[in-house]
Image: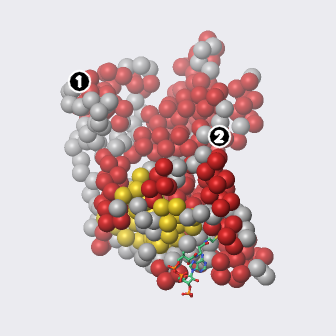
Amino acid sequence: MLLWGQWLSGAWYRQRLSGCCLYRCYTLFSSASASGLAKLLHDKLLQPLSIFCARIVSGNEIADNRLNLNQNMGGDIMAAKKAVKKTVKKTVKRKAASKIKDPVFETVKIERDKGITFLIMNRPEKRNAMSPQLHMDMNDAIDYLSIDPATDVLVVTGAGKAFSAGQDIKLYFRGTADDPAARAKARRASNAWRWQKLSRFPKPTIAMVNGFCFGGAFTQVCACDFAIASNTATFGLSEVNWGIIPGGIVSWNVVQVMNYRNAVYYATTGEPFNGKRATEIGMVNKSVPAGKLKAEVMKLARLMQEKSPAAVRYTKEAIRSVRFMNEPEAADYLNAKSDALKHVDKEDSRGQGMSQFLDEKSYRPGLGHFERRNKG
Ligand code: COA
């Protein structure tokens, strides 16, 4: 009953799993499998039913999975052996970047390098300050790239010497001051791409902070899975310097990546800090000399390309989501997420990984990743 109540009231649960009601019931009962009745229902009724429904209902993600019943029933080693036999060495055929006709935007640029897509805020003469138009363009570009099969990793960066100088004080603030509808539209677009869409982007995302990064631009840095900065990038919660608070959701973002003392300090002083300091306080993963920034970002992006895309996606979603859950919610969610991963992973990463370690002895999971031979 408790779990049932959680399911009814838990918006988080409904949001996180696929749209199929019966599939939710399946994951719910999976987590209650300690009870005999639940186990019986799970084994005899819900598991076959959920697999049937998953095939029918969830066309994009679940329908073309390899549903490995042996694996679900505990035959992991057998499944791993079969997976090796089934494994066909495939190379992912990609269109050359020059052949992809990306849409053209007024304030945003898309560049490509073998599966790595650079989404570039492109108003260098205004230090990539975010105008309402830039928000609209970024929204459209992220929608387009989120379903782009040629994007394995997304890198967000800025043209010229800035990452982004934050909201455009002239066009975003003054320009919409007397037009509440225009302000509301710009604010909605601004929050949608910088947080909702970017933080839920299905592929790994890297913020490449190449220069000035102020105010509202902190949100897209925090939304990305990783952030790498130039040592000489200049960060600042500069809102206080011109009489406003870190609004939008900037204050909420910074207390998640840096500790409370630093968040209060930098937000109330407006003191600028460089890439090295940004690393020390958790704002970015690392900083490197400006001349090595792109190479460092590419190194991480290429590493992401080598890992199982389904495992990476589910891992980043899990880490992001559990932050806002209590322990029982997190345990239940992670059980369901683990079960779901087996169904959505077209490459059977778990089977490949297990077999290459246990049977082939060709790698050690503690020291590196398995070789992806089943690229989907
Ligand atoms: N909003 C509107 N315009 C901006 C801007 C912003 N956030 N940041 C830069 N610009 C504009 C400048 O007004 C200037 O426009 P102009 O050429 O028409 O005069 C142009 O971009 C270049 O800026 P400039 O200040 O001359 O460049 P700089 O390299 O000397 O300094 C910054 C760069 C980023 C340090 C400085 O522009 C700045 O402090 N910007 C505001 C940053 C900020 O506080 N953002 C938070 C907003 S919530």
Label 1 CB, ligand 1: below 8 Å?
no
Which secondary structure lies at badge 1?
loop
| Residue at figure coordinates x 76%, y 79% from the top left | 177
Q: Is residue 353 above or below residue 44?
A: below
Q: Mark 2 vs mark 1: give the one in front.
A: 2
Q: Earlier in the sequence, mark 2 or mark 1?
A: 2
Residue 15, by quadrant, is: top right
Q: Is residue 101 above or below residue 229?
A: below
Disc 2/disc 1 C-alpha distance (Å): 39 Å
- Report the residue that reaches farthest toward the top: 36
Residue 216, by quadrant, is: bottom right
| Residue at figure coordinates x 29%, y 73% from the top left | 98
Is residue 256 among what the camera can see?
no
What residue does disc 1 label? 359
Q: Is residue 110 above or below residue 355?
A: below
Percent of width and height locating residue 192: 62, 62
Which residue type does callout 2 highlight? Phe
Left or right, 48 with reference to 324: left
For disc 1, the neighbor class at 10 Å (few under 14, some 14 to 19, many from 20) is few
| Residue at figure coordinates x 70%, y 83% from the top left | 175
Which secondary structure lies at badge 2?
loop
Q: If the picture is divided into quarters, which one holds ligand 1?
A: bottom right
Q: Is residue 333 above or below residue 44?
A: below
Which residue type does callout 1 highlight? Asp
Q: Nearer the viewer, residue 238 or 364?
A: 238
What residue does disc 2 label? 324
